[in-house]
Amino acid sequence: MSYEAYWNEIVSEYNDNLNCKEEIVQKTWEVLFKLCFGYLKSDIDSQRSVKMGVMTKRADIVIKNDTEDLFVVELKRHTLHDGQAQLFSYLNQLKIDLGILVCDNLYIYDYDFTAKEDSYSVLEIPFTQNNPNGSRFVEFFSKDNFDKQKIKDFIKESNQKKNSESEIKNELSINLITELLKNHFSEKYPAADVENILAEYNISINLKSSTVTSSFDSVASDVSQTYIPAPAFGAKDSTQFMVNGTPTGGKGPTVYRAVQFYVESHTGISFNELQAAFPDYMAKPGFGKMIRRWEEVTPQQWSGSRFNKHPIILSDGSKVAVSTQWKPDNMHNFIENVARLGIEIKAIN
């Protein structure tokens, strides 16, 4: 089988185990490391005891060879984003610099256990079929190909590519296109005439299969301010969703992941820009609050679990709280509106 075929098998198993307990996830990955990566049973050290001060904890999987530990794998339920701190504690104690976290997505860490504070590079790989980075993950972590430096280079190169793409997307704006048009036509026509003609046109940049402009300032005006009637599913439905092809679980985690995805795709976004992209009418009818600054959420709202208690942190350190108040009618409204941001949410059951 090809590396892509092995990765697709991993994605299939991931989807099959979406809501399974961690014990099932553990057994599945033990089998995957044998079948897809070529490790022997003796290479897979499951539930290794790790001394943490006066406590002893168990690392889910440590992959080793005859002479050394190669990397640690921390496994969580697939609908959660959790486990980084636990993985780092094992990497520190075992003096290992490569770690894998499996939860809502797959995360590969290049970790510096010699640093006084957590120092690391991380590559996030969504569990999507035919994902090129997923195929490379299988290739680099296979027993016959394992090379720490190549893995570190893979993480670095992938992040550089992602950053370059984000920078290009961030620079794409209505103002940029307008200035380019002005420069182009001003070479042949009077500048005043060009200004007057361009003023007669609405200029926008649209993502494929989307109608949202790339300008943060115009996002709110492009998103419909009226909600769409709810679809046919019941008020107490347990519908599971996926965001841009990645399973995310129920309504609350799906909304959280959609906002998180938008932040990750817009490096340097401010809170005001994020709130322009996710205005309150996206959460109506119902609670009517979409996102808030962390410090603005009242004790009553926290005690009522009206916002997710895991903040989304922006590049300037601002913490963002995301609403947890989602029912079929306002979820349908959210899905319809967020599509205009280039985020596709689909029900999977």
Image: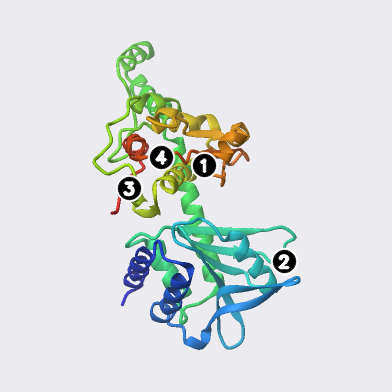
Q: Which mark is residue 237?
A: 3
Give how far apart the Cα atoms at labels 4 and 3 are: 11 Å
The residue under label 2 is 114
Of marks 3 and 1, the one in the foreground: 3
| Mark 4 in CB contact with mark 3 (< 8 angstroms) | no
- The quadrant of the image that shows the N terminus is bottom left
Residue at left offset 31%, top offset 21%: 202
Q: CA distance from mark 4 to mark 2?
A: 44 Å
Residue, disc 4: 326
Disc 4 marks a residue whose amino acid type is Trp
Q: Position of residue 91 (x, y in %)?
A: 64, 69
Q: What SS does tag 4 mark? A: loop
Name the residue rendered at 33%, 17% in the picture: 198
Secondary structure of the residue carrying tag 2 is loop
The residue wearing badge 1 is 267
* Residue 260 image point, x, y percent: 48, 45
Disc 1 to disc 2, C-alpha distance: 29 Å
